[in-house]
């Protein structure tokens, strides 16, 4: 399929440098504004293009992919997570799916540590006090938080990002524990000084901080459900920079309100931008608007991977970041 004839539709605004390169390489349709496409707009795009470049805001379910045009041959996702794409149906239709793994590992791990510090040291409360003009001076007992050094950090999901979080946590003097679908090789465990827990329940019950770093799949939906959240120590905190669906948000909100969990730092939410209003009212919760991967460097590198996946496919080869159903 010659690249000069390749029709590409991009569903959201991308960094200018990425869009410029797209225009140089392909017959590309870009967005004039940054609002998400409607379902009808997505369907129209999928029926009239060779390659779709979606983002996590585009829900490409079974019915959407089944209604795509026969010429659609590649969904080159701008982002690492593909839980918004029905990869199985795409493969059945002969449509390849690629993603952009690895490029936001450090950015997301940095944000995880930022949330851990923000929650345990009560940074947003101090910020709000300063911005409101309520601060009257230093006090020995004001805004007392907790020291992170020596605390037990339980990482749920020890892939690239989980391991990057572990390295940062060790630098802060934290004890690293983890639960993963598969145990890491012994040399990686030794490097990270990480303790493996086969039982997630047992790990959760013993940790001071839980960090969610696993992808959203059918197997991880509400992995931190009400029963498991109740296993957490009352003085423990939970941080999520992965996918909101992994945590039962309503159960978490109830427990935070009741003081059964000390605090939470959340960059992702179960229903996207529809956040439980009761969660917004809590001063022991730090909420961020899905900023984990929001660095200029990361967004540009994501675009470069998308371009490489499309160009490799256009040249008749397998995209380097091809997503297979068995990987999910």
Image (cartoon, rainbow, N blue to C red):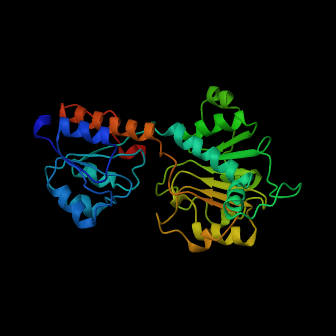
The correct choice, above or below, for 258 with respect to 174 in the image is below
> Which one is in front, 317 or 91?
317
Q: Position of residue 314 (x, y in %)?
A: 18, 35
**In the rendered view, would you say 262 is above or below 151?**
below
Q: Quadrant of the N terminus?
A: top left
Q: Please provide percent x and percent y for residue 152.
A: 75, 45
Q: Closest to the observer: 289 or 148? A: 289
Image coordinates of residue 5 in percent, x first then y, are: 10, 40
Quarter holding residue 276: bottom right
Q: Residue at x 64, y 50 (%)?
A: 115
**Outermost residue toward the right?**
140
Judge left or right: residue 309 versus residue 72.
right
Which residue is more in the foreground, 243 or 281? 281
- Dividing the picture into quadrants, the one containing residue 138 is bottom right
Image label count: 0
**Residue located 63% across and 53% down the image:** 239
- The residue lying at 52 percent from left, 62 percent from top is 269
Q: x, y percentage for residue 18? A: 30, 39
Q: Is residue 135 visible?
A: yes
């Amino acid at each position: 399929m010659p690249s000069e004839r390749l029709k590409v539709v991009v569903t959201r605004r991308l960094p200018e440098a990425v869009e410029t390169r797209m225009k140089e390489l392909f017959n590309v349709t870009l967005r004039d504004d940054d609002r998400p496409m409607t379902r009808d707009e997505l369907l129209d795009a999928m029926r009239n293009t060779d390659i779709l470049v979606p983002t996590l805001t585009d829900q490409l379910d079974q019915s959407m992919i089944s209604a795509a045009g026969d010429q659609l041959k590649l969904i080159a996702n701008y982002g690492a997570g593909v839980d918004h794409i029905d990869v199985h149906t795409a493969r059945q239709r002969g449509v390849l799916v690629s993603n952009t793994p690895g490029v936001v590992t450090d950015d997301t791990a940095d944000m995880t540590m930022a949330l851990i510090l923000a929650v345990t040291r009560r940074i947003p409360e101090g910020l709000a006090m300063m911005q409101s003009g309520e601060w009257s001076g230093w006090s020995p007992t004001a805004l007392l938080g907790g020291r992170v050094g020596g605390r037990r950090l339980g990482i749920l999901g020890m892939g690239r990002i989980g391991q990057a979080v572990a390295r940062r946590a060790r630098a802060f003097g934290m004890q690293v524990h983890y639960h993963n679908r598969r145990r890491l090789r012994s040399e990686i465990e030794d490097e990270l000084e990480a303790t493996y827990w086969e039982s997630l329940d047992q790990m959760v019950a013993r940790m001071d901080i839980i960090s969610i770093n696993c992808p959203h799949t059918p197997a991880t939906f509400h992995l931190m459900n009400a029963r498991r959240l109740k296993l957490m120590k009352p003085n423990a905190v939970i941080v999520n920079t992965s996918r909101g669906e992994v945590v039962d948000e309503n159960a978490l909100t109830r427990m935070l309100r009741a003081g059964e969990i000390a605090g939470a730092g959340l960059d992702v939410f179960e229903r996207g931008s529809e956040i439980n209003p009761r969660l917004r009212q809590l001063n022991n919760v730090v909420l961020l608007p899905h900023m984990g991967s929001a660095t200029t460097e990361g967004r540009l590198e994501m675009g470069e991977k998308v371009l490489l996946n499309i160009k490799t496919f256009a040249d008749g080869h397998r995209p380097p970041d091809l997503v297979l159903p068995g990987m999910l």
